[in-house]
Image (tube, helix red, strand yellow):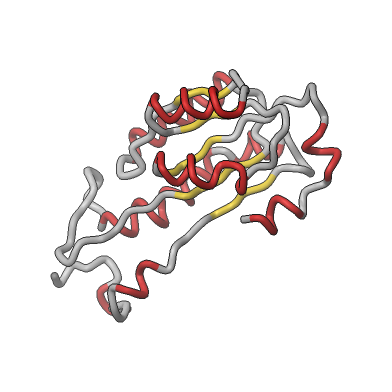
């Protein structure tokens, strides 16, 4: 993550009056532990989809009162669509989208409310839906807009990927 932040234009992050909402799709402890690595300290307006206690802790720690809470259930396309509508109505543009969802699949197949395999729906397809849904907001922040997709190597601990059963329908 440090490389991504280091590649940004220094002036881009140091302009005090610039409006920069940042939705995070992240587990609360990951946002808290890696917050400074993800976005360098500057005057940003941020939208987090984490619990209220983490929101308040970030406000206290950073001194930035422009951190807002938006709930998203990444296993539900209805919830993602509602978030996208809410975001577009509240914020004129989006400078940085950080997708950092982390669903750990179980041995048995689980499905979302939309009847998709949970690991694929949350860790892959929700990123796609957010990127597509926020595309116009990102274009308004061009050319500085960024998308950061984070993935873990946890799947390597689960064994071989069954390419013939990627949606785990046989389990």
In the picture, which quadrant includes the N terminus? bottom right
Residue located 54% across and 35% down the image = 23
Residue located 22% across and 68% down the image = 168
Vertical order, 103 against 81 (above or below): below
Using residue 12 as the reference point, say whether residue 134 is left or right of it.
Answer: left
Q: Quadrant of residue 3?
A: bottom right
Single out the residue that lies furthest toward the right.
Answer: 11
Q: Position of residue 142 (x, y in %)?
A: 76, 40
Using residue 146 as the reference point, say whether residue 12 is left or right of it.
Answer: right
Q: In the image shown, does 135 or 47 lie closer to the viewer?
A: 47
Q: In the image shown, does 58 or 161 lie closer to the viewer?
A: 58
Q: In the image shown, does 86 or 59 lie closer to the viewer?
A: 59
Q: Quadrant of residue 72?
A: top left
In the picture, which quadrant includes the C terminus? bottom left
Residue located 42% across and 57% down the image = 124
Single out the residue that lies furthest toward the front.
Answer: 61
Vertical order, 121 against 16 (above or below): below
Q: Position of residue 143 (x, y in %)?
A: 79, 44
Q: Quadrant of residue 62?
A: top right
Please tell me how many numbered marks the rendered image carries.
0
Using residue 89 as the reference point, say whether residue 153 is left or right of it.
Answer: left
Q: Position of residue 63 (x, y in %)?
A: 62, 22
Vertical order, 34 against 14 (above or below): below
Residue located 20% across and 53% down the image = 111
Q: Position of residue 86 (x, y in %)?
A: 48, 23
């Amino acid at each position: 993550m440090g490389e991504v932040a280091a590649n940004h234009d220094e002036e881009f992050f140091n302009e005090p009056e610039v409006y920069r909402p940042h939705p995070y799709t992240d587990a609360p402890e990951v946002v808290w532990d890696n917050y400074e690595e993800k976005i360098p300290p500057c005057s940003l307006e941020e939208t987090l989809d984490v619990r209220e206690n983490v929101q308040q802790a970030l406000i206290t720690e950073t001194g930035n009162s422009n951190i807002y809470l938006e709930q998203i259930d990444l296993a539900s396309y209805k919830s993602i669509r509602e978030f996208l509508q809410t975001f577009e109505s509240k914020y004129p543009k989006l400078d940085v989208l950080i997708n950092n969802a982390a669903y750990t699949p179980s041995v048995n197949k689980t499905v979302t409310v939309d009847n998709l395999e949970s690991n694929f729906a949350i860790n892959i397809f929700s990123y796609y839906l957010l990127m597509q849904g926020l595309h116009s907001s990102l274009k308004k922040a061009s050319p500085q807009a960024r998308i950061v997709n984070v993935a873990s190597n946890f799947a390597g601990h689960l064994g071989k990927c069954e390419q013939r059963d990627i949606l785990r329908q046989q389990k």
